[in-house]
Amino acid sequence: MLVAAIKRVYNPAMPARGRAAKPEVWTTRRLLDWTTSYFQRHELDAPRLSAEMLLAHVLEVDRLRLYMDPERPANDLERAAYRDLVERAIAPEPVDYLVGKSHFFSMLLDVTPDVLIPRPSTETLVEHVVQHARRTPGFHGPVIADIGTGSGAIAIALAKHVKESRVIATDISPAALDVARKNAERQGVVDRIDFREGDLLSALRGTRVRYLVSNPPYISDAEWEDVASNVKDHEPVTALRAGTEGLDVLRPLIEQATSNLDTPGQLVFEIAASQKQAVLDLVAQAGGLSNAHVLADHEALPRVLVADRA
């Protein structure tokens, strides 16, 4: 255990041949290597990155600094704080919550247990909108609505990378909106995002938008049983679960999309990989939408529904 291993630092080693041996020194390099191996044995996701995030948080430096001074010895207080976070990560608590930060689309965002931790699959959604807006006539300087914004990851990334865009970011949770607003301030785009509290499309109040985007709850009751405990026990359940088929939020979003989509316009929603055919069927039944297809994410899984306003 790391606890036992690091505790040895506090006590002098046994004397050797009449002379006191030097105590062990836990440098940045040694702490990272040991913790990476420890996390690997406990099958923690991204073990090296997790170790870096925790140690950088304790030392109050960015991750690059860890490699610029790898032989820096950690003092007693730093080792104690780091040891506590490592054990909590194994418990397991999400590392992003432990450090209060998460990386998304080349940004470092604040996260709390009031919001989901942004994930790489969602970057597929953002990348699609950024590229589509750049190359598609009629989509320059668009109004974008991000439904269920959470940490604001999608809304902020789009405000930063889609030129002259204006973004409406909605959420039913006031606490989530507070996190999103603070993130927008730190990223320098708060003046281009309108934060609105409300359920699904009601917060748009009839506003027409070029892009309607969302990473909604979509985990079905059956799939919930297989969700990892660090997600199930710590992230907001209302932002994850969506009924028997996982469609309790996606269904109304798809059925009501044309009431807020301009012409031209496009909806872009994250989905579960198992829902590809189900959401394509919903689009066909809804009417007013065309060219429905599902994009693959970074793991080649079908994860992002795209459909145009007919």
Image (cartoon, rainbow, N blue to C red):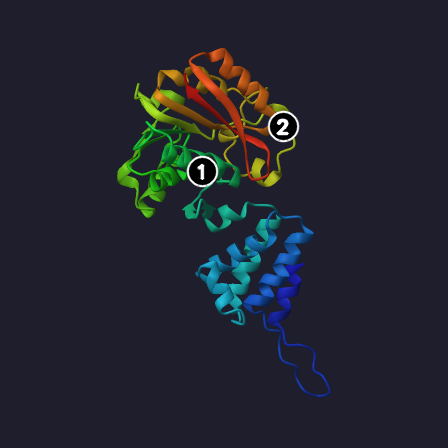
Residue 162 vertical placement versus 47 (above, below) = above
Tell me the residue at 67%/50% (across/down): 42
Amino acid, disc 2: Glu
**Amino acid beneath label 1:** Glu
| Residue at the image point whose x is 37% and y is 23% from the top | 265
Secondary element under disc 1, as helix, strand or loop, is helix
Asked whether, in this view, residue 238 is left or right of residue 88, the answer is: left
Q: Is residue 125 above or below residue 68?
A: above
Q: Which residue is mark 1?
A: 127
Q: Position of residue 121 (x, y in %)?
A: 52, 37
Write the residue at 46% across / 17% down: 290
**To which residue does mark 2 refer?**
223
Residue depicted at x 61% and y 47%? 45
Q: Determine whether the residue tagged by mark 2 lies in a helix, strand or loop.
A: helix
Observer-nearest of 60 and 45: 45
Q: Is residue 295 left or right of residue 152?
A: right
Q: Nearer the viewer, residue 297 or 248?
A: 297
| Category of crowding for the residue at label 2, using alpha-carbon neighbours closer than 10 angstroms: few (below 14), some (14–19), many (at least 20) | some
Q: Which x, y percent locates residue 210?
A: 34, 26
Task: From this view, report whether residue 244 is shown above or below residue 296.
Answer: above
Quadrant where the C terminus is found in the figure: top left
Vertical order, 137 against 64 (above or below): above
Give the image location of residue 191, x and y in percent.
26, 39
